[in-house]
Structures are given as C-alpha cells and as structure tokens.
Amino acid sequence: MTRRTRVRIDMTPMVDVAFLLLIFFMSTTQFRPPETVAVDLPLSQSEIHVPETGTIILTMNQTGQVFISSETGRDIQELAPDNVLEAIVNWRSRNPGAVVVVKTDRDAPFGAMADLMDTLGHAKTLRFNLMTDLAKEPAAARHTAAAPVQERTDG
Amino acid sequence: MADVSTPDSGAKPARATGILGRAQKKRPGIRIDMTPMVDVAFLLLIFFMVTTVFRRPLAMEVNLPEPDAKVEVPESNVVTVFVDREEDLFVKVGKGGIEPITWADLTPTLQANAAANPNLIVLVKIHREARYEPMVDLMDTLEDAKMERFSLIAMNERDQEALEAAP
C-alpha cells in the first residue's frame, strides 16, 4: 500500500482578504432609500456629478406633480402647484449652500417643467442641475429610426 | 481545511517528555472548524459586492438668466428650433420660413449657421404638451455643437399657428 501524502492548504490568507473586502463593502455601501416617486430619468451625455450631500432635490413625476426632498429622499413631500415657490424659498433659506437638483421624469410634460424652471427663476435659484442618466450615444443617434425605443425601467 | 488548531494537535500522538523526564499531562488539541463562519463571510461579501452602487447620479448644469432680463436681438441673428406636440423638429433660420428637420441634420445646420453668423442666438421653443425628454436631447445636441447659450421657452399660440401653417 502506497502512502499518500495529505495535502493541506492554508486558507488563512484568503479568508483574511475576504474579510477585508467584506468590511470594505459593508462600510461603503449606502442603501438606496426606497423611492416613493418613480422617476425615469432622461438620457444625456453630460458627465457632471451631483454632489452627494447638501442638495435639495425637486422631483417631478410622469404626470408633472412636484415633490421636494433632501438628498436622502426620506423627507419627501408633495407640493401643490401654488406652494412650489414658497417651498423652494423656504428650503433654500434653511440651507443656503445647498445645490438644487431637478429630477424630472423624461415623460413629464414640458409645460410643467417650463413652469418649474420659471418658478426656480423667481425663487432666485438661477443655477441648478438637471439629473440625467448617462447616454452612450449622442441625442441625434438616439432619434434615428433604427434606434430601439428606450424601455421605461419602472414598468 | 479552515481550522484553528493548537500545535500539538498534529497527527503524532507521541508522548512528550519534560525536562525532568517525567511524562507530561497530555493536553487535548483544540480544533475549531471555521468553515461555517467563512461560508457566511463569503456570502455577505458577495451580497455587498453585488448591491454596492458606486455610480453617482449625473446631471446637466443650468444657469438661468435673471427672470425679468430682456435682451433685444435682431431677427436675422436668431435660429429658432421648434418641437411640436408630436415631438417633431422644425427650424427657422433668421427671417426664413419654418422648415421640418431631422435630429441628424440639426447639429450640422446649427453649426453651419453659427459659422456664417458669429452673433447667432439659438431659441428653443417646445410645445407645452410635448414631453420633457426632447428638451434634454436638444440641450445635449446644443452642447455638442458648442452652443451652450440658448433661450428655452414654451411655445405660445402664435408659434403654434405658424407651425401649423408650415409645410
């Protein structure tokens, strides 16, 4: 009978690395807050990043309703059309350094968006960001007949 | 495999002898099976790797003019891009007529006009019942054409009538 040498693999370094990665991912993960308002963003080739903190987010859904929240989205509240100006002024005075980000659904009516931008102008918020998703190709290519129609992600 | 074991837990059960030759008490080797813990660790690792989103949302920057600012511009210096309710594009160069245009032709047309007239101003007029998406697409196109200054307004009734009269 031939004696077989037993193979022992020391798994300690691998487990060490695994734990390191685990700790890294656990500490860096930020869970996306549950989205109370479903918004399908328009595509653009702009690559400007929205700051992670210190933002006031104005959300407009598909039907043109306006919501206001901070970047966490937990304090989201719906705004009646007459209250939009007042709410923007209030939120801006509470955190003057905040960047205003407008998150509008790509199927929202342009009229509602034009009104919102008008209101922002009257609230002396002349600089703001429009949140977009990254597009792989320029707008002209997206509009050619051959391009498939973008599916909505929220069903 | 993933075991913690004390040194004397090896295969040899040989009796160790102390300095004085007395037989020492045999200590049982402690073996902790780490496999379940490592399993869980890897599961968590995979979970966090899959759910982590490094991507931050992107945005376009918009600078509005003062709300009541008025700038008088001669009509010949204006290129107007119309988007009607059906989201078809029309363009009106200077004092010319309104003509339909495709998305693919828009950038070259704008660039040709900008090259011919350095004082050119782009006016974007979108129907209120059109969607928001063509506005972003137009902003994208204009940025591509290096025309970052443009006016954006909702169409009024006169524009709509003019559009309907156009071919």
Image (cartoon, coloured by chain):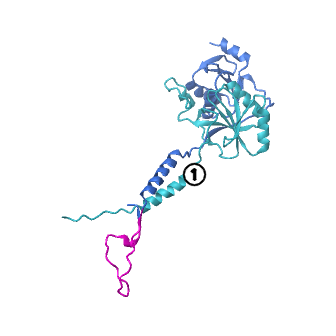
Chain colours: A cyan, B blue
Residue B152 visible at all:
no
Kindly indicate the quadrant of the structure image that contains residue B105. top right
Q: Position of residue A76 (x, y in %)?
A: 69, 38
Q: Residues within 10 Å of mark 1 (few under 14, many from 20)?
A: few
Judge whether A71 appears above or below B91 on screen. Answer: below
Q: Does the magenta stretch include residue A117?
A: no
Q: Does the magenta stretch include residue B8?
A: yes
Identity of the residue drawn at 80% across and 34% down: A86
Q: Position of residue B30 (x, y in %)?
A: 41, 68
Task: Work out whether residue A93 or residue A13 is closer to the camera in this orientation and state it.
Answer: A13
Q: Which residue lies furthest to the right in this view?
A: B68
Task: Please indicate whether residue B49 sits to the left or right of residue A10 in the image.
Answer: right
Task: Work out whether residue A112 or residue A82 is closer to the camera in this orientation and state it.
Answer: A82
Q: Where is residue A74 in the image (x, y as percent from the top left)?
A: 67, 41
Kindly indicate the quadrant of the structure image that contains residue A37. top right
Residue A91 visible at all:
yes
Instruction: Give the residue type that dot 1 points to.
Output: Thr
Of all chains, the one bearing label 1 is A
Q: Residue furthest bottom?
A: B20
Kindly indicate the quadrant of the structure image that contains residue A95. top right
Q: Which residue lies furthest to the left in this view?
A: A1
Q: Give the range drawn in magenta.
A: B4-32
Judge whether A93 appears above or below B104 on screen. Answer: below
Task: Please indicate whether residue B27 sits to the left or right of residue A37 in the image.
Answer: left
